[in-house]
Amino acid sequence: MRDVRGDFPFLEAHPQLAFLDSAASTQKPWPVIDAMASFQAAAYANVHRGAYRLSQVATTAYENARSTVAGFIGVADPEELVFTRGTTTGLNLVAAGITDLLDTGDSVVVTEMEHHANLIPWQRATKRSGAELRVVGLTPDHRLDMAGLASRVDESTKVVAVTGMSNVLGTKPDLPAISALAGAFGAATIVDGAQLVPHSPVDVAGLGIDAIAFGAHKMLGPTGIGALWMRRSLAESIEPFETGGEMIREVTLTDATWAPIPAKFEAGTPPITEAVGFATAIDYLSGLGMTEVSAHEAGLTELALERLADDVDGVTVFGPPVGPDRGGVISFAVDGVHAHDVATILDEHGVAV
């Protein structure tokens, strides 16, 4: 992979800093910064609502961004991709919609390794509907217990919610196997893709899943925008998470009907400039090649795990060993030292974790 450090002004501004917190949020390359500044300065207008030329140009840029993001994860129909405020909003959107379809006697399956954004919405969904929440544990090496999953998915299961890559353990569950198991019982597989999509090639058709949410700011793009892909049949079966302008087909003082997807789920003025930045970030990653990005990260992960195991006394590393189901997120503990103190000491040596 080519040397890309010169593309990031942040690294030029902080040449001695080792920034190792990209799992939380990534720095932005010049193309993303420039594209957003240029659009904001000379091409900005609200979208879908103006008959004047500038609004039409902005609308085209916004919808082209949708097509770019959809294509990045192998979505054939861009209308199935909804722009959101981020991964959390996307997961809450689909969980809120599915809540109306749940009833007493149904079940939702989640895993112990889920981020709060893919756990709490399903806690609320089951509490509100009377459905059962079932939790799948992990193996001793911090992989998903597939036998445990198989024992919890049955005819009552409507949803299996799972991370594409754990933000704590780096574990990458076998999504095709999980979706095949869920699909055999007619259950939908909902994926938190916040850590998966920025680091690996993703093809939703090949994964067999029903929905995946991810955010731009973890993949070199801006904050305030993310994407949710839902299979059309799922998207058309659930109610919108928010209501307001743009998502209406017809409205009276006493009732309303919804616009077709994706507008159905995009109430209000969308993050227009951010969509341009999101698409530019994806173009940047696509130019590097996601296969190359994944391979480069795998090499760095292997090196980091080796150094932590061999060079530092009293360190415990969490997550599976190096392998195809091991992502680049690494969590560790230092014996007798609080995590905040470790982070503070590393920061004093120019390492951000």
Image (cartoon, rainbow, N blue to C red):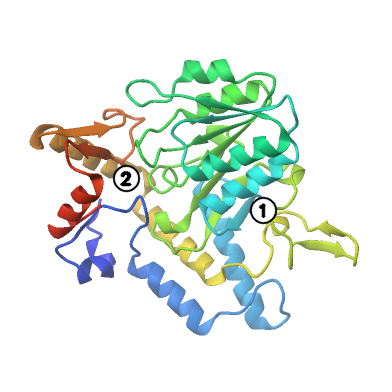
Q: Please name the residue that numbered disc 2 is placed on.
A: 292
Q: Please name the residue that numbered disc 1 is placed on.
A: 79
For numbered disc 1, what is the local secondary structure? helix
- Say above or below: 270 vs 304: below
Q: Position of residue 211 (x, y in %)?
A: 60, 41
| Mark nearer the viewer, 2 or 1 | 1
Left or right of 47 in this view: 26:
left
Marks 2 and 1 sit apart, C-alpha to C-alpha, by 29 Å
For numbered disc 2, what is the local secondary structure? helix
Residue under the point 33% across and 62% down: 27
Q: Quadrant of residue 161?
A: top right
Left or right of 190 in this view: 174:
left
Left or right of 85 in this view: 289:
left
Q: Position of residue 43 (x, y in %)?
A: 54, 80
Question: Can residue 350 be seen from the camera position used here?
Answer: no
**Which class describes the residues within 10 Å of circle 1: few (<14), some (14-19), or many (20+)?**
some
Q: Position of residue 80 (x, y in %)?
A: 65, 49
- Say above or below: 9 vs 322: below
Q: In this orientation, which residue lies closer to the viewer: 113 or 29? A: 113
Identify residue type, mark 2: Glu
- Number of the label disc, if any, that sits on residue 162: none
Residue under the point 65% across and 78% down: 55
Identify residue type, mark 1: Glu
